[in-house]
Amino acid sequence: LTMAILTSVYPSGTRVRVTQQTPLRAETWTNEVEGVIQRSRQAKTGSWFAHAKDDQLWLDRLEIRLDDGEIAVLNLDQYSVVEVIQP
């Protein structure tokens, strides 16, 4: 069982803005990150999940380089929106 939201959809070098939301009971937290994709992949977590590949929970991960050089690793879910930013 995997969530194929982004894996291999955008090539490395693509500039994107990722908006992620965390729904809470009374509000929603929103965070935006903008940068250049270094790598997109599915990676397993340390969590055990029956009947999944290698009995692990797999997440879509996007690694992007921010403008200040920092590398951000984002776990994508159904609340993640990825927008391509044209140069």
Image: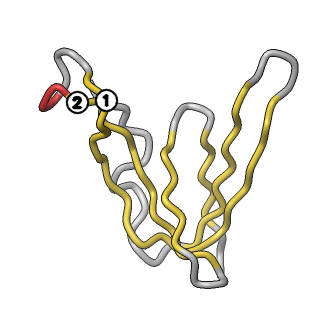
Give the image's coloring scheme.
secondary structure
Q: Which amino acid type is shown beneath numbered disc 2?
A: Gln
Q: Is residue 19 above or below residue 56?
A: below
Compute the Cα span from label 1 to label 2. Answer: 6 Å
Q: Which residue is mark 2?
A: 56
Tag 2 secondary structure: strand
The furthest residue to the left? 54
Q: Which residue is mark 1?
A: 47
Q: Which amino acid type is shown beneath numbered disc 1?
A: Ser
Q: Is residue 25 toward the left or the right of residue 4 in the image?
A: right
Q: Is residue 41 toward the left or the right of residue 14 in the image?
A: left
Tag 1 secondary structure: strand
Q: Are marks 1 and 2 in contact (CB under 8 Å)?
A: yes
Q: Which mark, residue 8?
A: none
In the figure, residue 53 lies in which quadrant?
A: top left
Location of residue 69 in the rendering, given as x and y in whole percent from the top left corner: 58, 84
**Disc 1 versus disc 2: nearer the observer:** 1
